[in-house]
Amino acid sequence: MKILQNAIQCPDGMILLSSNNYEIKKHIDKNGKEYAIRGGKHTLERLGANDHTELSITENHSLQFVFNNILWLTENRYRPMIGLGSAHLESIYRHKTSSLFHRFAIAEILTLRKYWPRRSA
């Protein structure tokens, strides 16, 4: 199983993402519980409390799951790419600083928005 993104979301909304095998990302939630993640794209390892939301993506996930859970670091926080504005996504795509995985997701998200725009309430 190939890991494309190794991440969790703590109950207070903080997202932890592990990008390499040796780093440990830690967070103490508002509830006082400690959450930690490591393993990068090698293994999905969780430490501490277990009441988090899993945001990891593997090659076995559906495209819908990928589009809803792929993350991007913006304003010093990881955010789901699906929630970023089209101009922001276009800027990321144009600057070519993202991985092929991220660029593919951006292209698909923007295509979907073009053909199925969100309707205002």
Image (cartoon, rainbow, N blue to C red):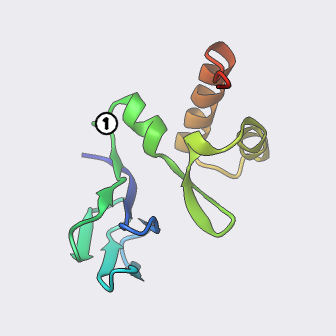
In the rendered view, tell whether residue 22 sits above or below residue 15: below
Residue 82 falls in image quadrant:
top right
Front-most of residues 80 and 44: 80
Q: Position of residue 107 (x, y in %)?
A: 63, 29
Along the viewing direction, whichever of 59 and 51 lies nearer the viewer: 51
Q: Which residue is mark 1?
A: 61
- Residue placed at 35% from the left, 53% from the top? 56
Picture residue at 42% right of the left edge, 38% below the top: 66
Picture residue at 37% right of the left edge, 78% below the top = 22
Residue 62 place in picture, x, y as percent: 34, 30
| Amino acid at dot 1 | His
Q: Residue 6: x and y, percent?
A: 37, 59
Q: In this rendered view, identify the residue nearer to me: 47 or 3.
A: 47
Horizontal side of 71 relative to 44 (left or right) equals: right
Q: Is residue 36 above or below residue 88?
A: below
Secondary element type, mark 1: loop
Toward the top, the furthest residue is 115
Q: Is residue 20 above or below residue 60?
A: below
